[in-house]
C-alpha cells in the first residue's frame, strides 16, 4: 500500500487544516508502519497556477514543511518533499497532456469556480491543474489517495487518465500506471469558522478571529474561543438538539474531535450548561493540543539548515521512487532518450 497526498504551501496553517487533513496523515503514517509507505508533498508547483509573490511562496513552503513535522509527520518514516525539487512531476504532467482531454478538463468543477467569468484571462496552468495532480499520484504508483468531497472529481480524472494511457500504450497487457483508490477518513473533521458556523475555517477570511492558527499563543487561543459566535440557548443533552445551531455544533464538534469523545457523550456531560461554562473547557483543550505543535514549529523555523536537509532528503527519496515510472512512460510513448 502506497499513500500519496499533497498540500499547497499557503502558510499560516489553522485548526481546520490540522483536524481536517494533517492529523489523518499522521494516523496513516502510524497505522501503515512497515506495511506500506506514505509520501507527502508540498504542492509548490500548483501554487504558481495563480498570481503569487515569489518570496512569499519560498517562505510559505518552509513554514508548511515545519508545520507538518511539528504536527507529527516523521521524515524518517514518511517521504516529505516539495514538488519543485522533483522535476519528474512536471515531466510526467507534460507526457500525460497527450492523454488528457480538453472536455474532461472543461468539466472540472474547481476550474469553473476559480476561473469564474474570466476564463480567457486565466493561466494555462490553472486549466491543466488536474493533469499535474494526476501526475503527482501516478508518478509514485499510488494505491490510495486521501480525498475530501472537493477532491473526488480530481482523483476520478487521474484514474481516467491512467486508464486511457494504459489502454493506449501498455505493452503486452502490462499497465504503466496503477489506478489509485480514494481514502475518505470516516472521522475527517470539517471545522467551521468561529464567526460563521456555515463557512469553513479559512485563512482567506479577513478576520483572524474566525480561525485558530496553529501558532497562536495560549492567551490568543482563549480570547478567540471566548469571542467565538454562539447563540443564547444552553447546550442540548443530545446531538439532535444541535440542529439549526451551526455555531454551537461547530464548537462541540471541535471539543469532541480533540478529546476523542463522541458528540453525544460531550453533550451528556454539558447538556443544560451555557457557553460561559463550555468555552473555557474548549479553550484549555485547544491550548494543550497546540502547545507542543507551536513549540516544535518555532524551533524548526529557527533552524533553516535542518528544514532544508529534511526537504532535500525527502526529495532525493521521491526522485528515486519516481524514476522507474517516468522511464516506463517515456518508453511506452516511443520517446528516444
Image (cartoon, rainbow, N blue to C red):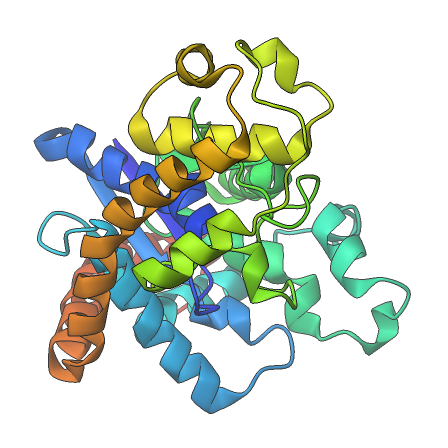
The answer to whether residue 300 is visible is: yes
Q: Is residue 321 left or right of residue 154?
A: left
**Left or right of 134: which side holds 244?**
right
Measuring 21% from the left and 58% from the top, which residue is drawn there?
Answer: 69
Quadrant of the rendering where the C terminus is positioned: bottom left
Which residue occupies 64% across, 52% down? 100
Image location of residue 148, percent across then percent down: 53, 37
Query: Looking at the image, is 88 positioned above or below residue 130?
Result: below
Looking at the image, residue 244 sits to the left or right of residue 311; the answer is right
* Residue 86 in the image, given as x and y percentages of width and height: 32, 69
The answer to whether 143 is drawn above or below residue 92 in the figure is above
Evaluate whether residue 136 shows in this view: no
Which residue: 47% across, 71% down?
45
Q: Position of residue 185 (x, y in %)?
A: 42, 27
State which quarter of the image contains the N terminus.
top left
Q: Quadrant of residue 202?
A: bottom right
326 to 2, vertically: above or below: below
Q: Nearer the viewer, residue 72 or 167?
A: 72
Residue 49 lies, with reference to residue 137, above or below; the image says below
Amino acid at each position: 500500500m502506497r499513500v500519496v497526498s499533497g498540500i499547497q504551501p499557503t502558510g499560516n496553517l489553522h485548526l481546520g487544516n490540522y483536524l481536517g487533513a494533517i492529523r489523518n496523515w499522521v494516523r496513516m503514517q502510524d497505522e501503515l508502519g512497515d506495511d506500506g509507505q506514505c509520501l507527502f508533498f508540498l504542492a509548490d508547483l500548483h501554487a504558481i497556477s495563480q498570481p503569487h509573490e515569489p518570496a512569499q511562496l519560498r517562505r510559505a513552503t518552509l513554514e508548511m514543511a515545519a508545520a507538518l513535522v511539528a504536527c507529527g509527520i516523521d521524515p524518517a518514516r514518511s517521504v516529505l518533499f516539495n514538488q519543485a525539487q522533483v522535476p519528474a512531476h512536471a515531466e510526467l504532467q507534460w507526457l500525460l497532456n497527450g492523454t488528457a482531454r480538453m472536455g474532461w478538463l472543461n468539466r472540472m468543477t474547481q476550474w469553473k469556480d476559480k476561473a469564474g467569468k474570466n476564463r480567457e484571462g486565466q493561466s494555462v496552468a490553472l486549466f491543466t491543474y488536474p493533469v499535474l495532480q494526476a501526475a503527482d499520484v501516478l508518478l509514485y504508483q499510488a494505491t490510495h489517495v486521501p480525498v475530501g468531497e472537493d477532491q473526488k472529481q480530481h482523483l476520478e480524472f487521474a484514474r481516467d487518465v491512467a486508464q486511457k494511457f494504459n489502454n493506449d500504450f501498455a505493452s503486452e497487457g502490462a499497465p504503466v500506471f496503477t489506478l489509485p483508490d480514494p481514502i475518505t477518513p470516516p472521522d475527517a473533521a470539517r471545522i467551521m469558522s468561529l464567526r460563521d458556523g456555515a463557512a469553513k475555517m479559512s485563512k482567506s477570511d479577513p478576520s483572524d478571529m474566525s480561525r485558530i492558527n496553529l501558532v497562536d499563543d495560549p492567551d490568543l487561543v482563549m480570547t478567540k474561543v471566548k469571542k467565538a459566535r454562539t447563540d443564547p440557548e444552553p447546550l442540548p443533552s443530545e446531538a439532535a438538539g444541535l440542529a439549526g445551531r451551526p455555531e454551537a455544533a461547530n464548537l462541540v464538534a471541535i471539543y469532541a474531535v480533540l478529546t476523542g469523545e463522541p458528540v453525544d457523550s460531550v453533550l451528556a456531560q454539558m447538556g443544560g450548561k451555557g457557553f460561559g461554562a463550555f468555552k473555557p473547557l474548549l479553550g484549555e483543550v485547544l491550548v494543550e493540543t497546540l502547545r507542543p505543535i507551536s513549540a516544535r514549529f518555532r524551533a524548526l523555523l529557527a533552524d533553516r539548515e535542518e528544514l532544508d536537509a529534511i526537504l532535500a532528503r525527502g526529495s532525493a527519496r521521491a526522485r528515486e521512487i519516481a524514476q522507474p515510472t517516468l522511464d516506463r512512460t517515456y518508453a511506452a510513448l516511443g520517446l528516444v532518450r
